[in-house]
Image (cartoon, coloured by chain):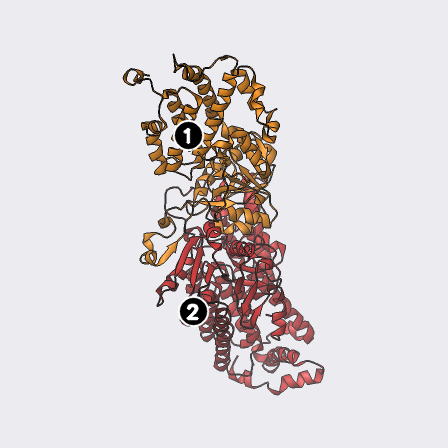
Amino acid sequence: MSPHESSDPIPSPTKETSSKGGSTPHQRQQGGSGAGGSQGGDENKASGSSAPAQKSMTKAERRELQEKQRAAKAAAKQPGAAPAAKDKEGGGGKGKGAREAGSTHTQNRASISGPGESSSSRLAGRDVAGDAGISKAGPPGDDPIRGSRIFAHFGLPKPVGNIKGDIHPAIIKLGLLFSEFKICGSNARCIATLTAFKTVIQDYTTPAHSTLSRHLMTHLSPQITHLVSARPMSTTMGNAIRQLKLEISGSDIDLPEQDAKDTLCSKIDDYIRDRIIIADEVIQDLAGKKIKDGDVILTYARSSVVEKVLLSAHEEGKRFSVIVVDSRPLLEGKYLLRKLTTCQPPIPCTYTLLPALPSVITEVNMVLLGAHALCSNGAVYSRAGTALVAMLAKNHNIPVVVCCETYKFNDTVILDGFSKNELAPKDISNISKDSQTPLLTPNLEILNPLYDLTPPTCITAVVTEVGLIPPNSISSIPLALGKTSL
Amino acid sequence: MTHGHHHPPQPLSPEEAANQRIVEVLASKLRRRQVVGSRAAALETLLVLRQVIAKARFWNIDQLVAIIRAVGRRLVDAQPNEHAVGNTVRKVLHHIREEYHTASKGADTTATSKNYSIAKFVLQGQPRKHVTTQRSETKATLKENDAEDPDSFARGLKPVLMEAIQDVLDELETVYDNVSKNAKDHIHSDEIILTIGMSKTVEAFLKAAAHSRKYTVIVAETAHRYGGREMAKSLSSTGISTFLVPDSSIYALMSRVNKVILGAHAILANGGMFAITGSLLAVTAARAHSTPVVVCAGQFKLTPLWNLYHEYGALDFGDPSKVLGFNEGDLVDKVDVVNPYYDYVRPELIDAFITNDGDHPPSSVYRLLKETYDDEDNEL
């Protein structure tokens, strides 16, 4: 989009919307940008029209089409979250263990990529690849095959192979960090993704005959696809990207390109600050108030929010001890342990592995847990093992407090940890080097699911930046925040 | 036996018996945990008892019982957490008394039910009783404290005792086969079974079921010993479709699990059990999903004990460096590490015990105990 184009059609959108009349401000904005694009085409017929087919549509139709495409794209990018059954089948090829997986997802990859393709055809291509993977898997009715079919829908991170399309180096780097679990945890991943997108946006130039608000997302889509191919997208990333899309499509087409990019970047900064950093500070305060001198706090694995809560409460001078429960595959609790014991004076810590949890739970006053996502039914989707901890604490009548920013809310309902999950790649799953590690035989498969789902009945309260709420009231929070979507 | 020439014909004192070399050897092996697994411990104990009885000089039943008890105490003290040792001693004592009663009272075996109890009443029709009654026909007269020939009592009793011990030995040796003989009735086709850690009994049970059923096993590897890896390897090598998962995913996978099958370390008098750490977590998760929990165990694990103490299972702790190794640097100095061996699982969390002698609900464990041991031996 040239400066000329962007500054030229100022009066025309308003003219057009007012001539149609009766549109809400929201509609006007969308209609305005749409009309602006076609207006540009109108005025510069010599340089070719941008969307001749769209031109003949009414605005409502156009909007509908946009929504549809957006939904299709979201479905394509979130294989785990997509409710479409065929998408899960598509994942089937991937979960089939290393041997098949290797061959299937090269197929997947080939059909996914190609920025020119429409999103719907991308989805279809993925389906075909998935089906091929299943039919390839061997004679039906064979037990091992049946076994792996049970787990087929678990997302398996794939080795980052050849890079298709125009992927920004920052994204390639991030993809590697994700796939090697160097950046792990939903907050860290979200911040890293948004920061990388800032670089991508700054390095982006709108091609001729297009507007930033309409083209930037098609530039970002392959970047997102690349990240998802490195590791399935986290809910936080999904929410943040959805917000970013909204900002992009709503960005004023009349702004000079650099200004528009700067605005977007500052919007991203605002999002990180408001929804993550400040939210965490509020959560620190709120959850810290629940910690009393002499308490024994139990936590599982490592949550960045829980870590901050514990450290800030300790800094305030509260004297409590912490039990860190940990488990394979990631053994993240050791990082937390290191953080807690290096502050001055060190927090008294006990470390134990998950099976020993019943032995230590009796002396605990409160269980503090982190979350990966929070479903609208109040269930907490979090690191595998969290549900066991919450369940046992509940059985011992110990309060279970989940620290979770509102941007982790997920407007779907998940019923068990089986329906949506992700497998840790074998090389990072901490299988110790000892000789008794079993070799893979045809009948043996090693699975390392990364998540599980804690039912709301096991949770006493969720600490968010808008206060402590019972888990069954989660669904009211987005509305209370004045949002129609998360 | 040559020592008759060197010693005056005095009965073996209990202290002497407990200090014998074979007893000493086993005690130190137990103390150093060189005997691993309850069945191995039971077998070793039984072999030692057999040798002790074979060598022992005694003039009456009380002396023999005192000797066995002293040996038993010594072994139990060496490793109080290996409950199978004490159980084996109790079982041998029970058999000794039974053989003594049948031998001294001749064919009049019904007299054994002199002290009336519901347990004995229920017991009347038990097949195990018939075996002992048939054997006792041979000896009609046994004289205790015979002044002329004090060893005649031991001479008369020892053969039947050896037979009785052989019975116990046979039972121990066939325990896995007998536990798993009805395996196919408990597992049906296409089921998904969850088990944790390594249990020889469960291994045999699952393999036996695999002869006639096609099903899937999920094995939780169970930190810190990660016995599940060995288990998964063994199961998959016999063609069972096996998945090895970390402990953390037990809850996530439980919604697809049809049955949880566990091993036990010791079955307690109230129907609860000591089992490998991780059992309580798996069982509680199963309860949350209403998944049945089945425990496979030989009856030598029946222990006349109650866990009235605390949650720290059998108060038995493993090596903390297995949890937080020294490769973690200075972290090791700053942090307490808890690494218990066993969980205590309450009876209400268990649906059934599958033993080598039938399947029992936890509520009837007390009856099995009354039947297997004599009350007076509960404290050795």
From the viewer's side, name the closer residue of B136 and A12.
B136
Number of callouts in the render?
Answer: 2
User: A303 above or below B165?
Assistant: below
Residue beneath the point at 53% across and 13% down: B137
Is the residue under label 1 in contact with that under label 2 (CB below 8 Å)?
no
The answer for how far apart the CA atoms under marks 2 and 1 are is 55 Å
Give x and y (percent) for residue B135.
52, 16
Residue A280 can be seen, yes or no = yes
From the viewer's side, name the closer residue of A144 and A169.
A144
The tint of chain B in the picture is orange
Q: Chain of mark 1?
A: B
Disc 1 crowd rating (10 Å Cα; few below 14, some 14-19, many 20+) is many
Q: Which residue is label 1 attached to?
A: B69
Q: Chain of mark 2?
A: A
Give x and y (percent) for residue B240.
52, 37
Identify the element where label 2 is drawn: loop
Residue A160 can be seen, yes or no = no
Q: Quadrant of the C terminus of chain B?
A: top left
Q: Amino acid at mark 1?
A: Arg
Q: Residue furthest front?
A: B147
Q: Which residue is label 2 attached to?
A: A318
The tint of chain A in the picture is red
Q: Amino acid at mark 2?
A: Lys
From the viewer's side, name the closer residue of A6 and B45.
B45
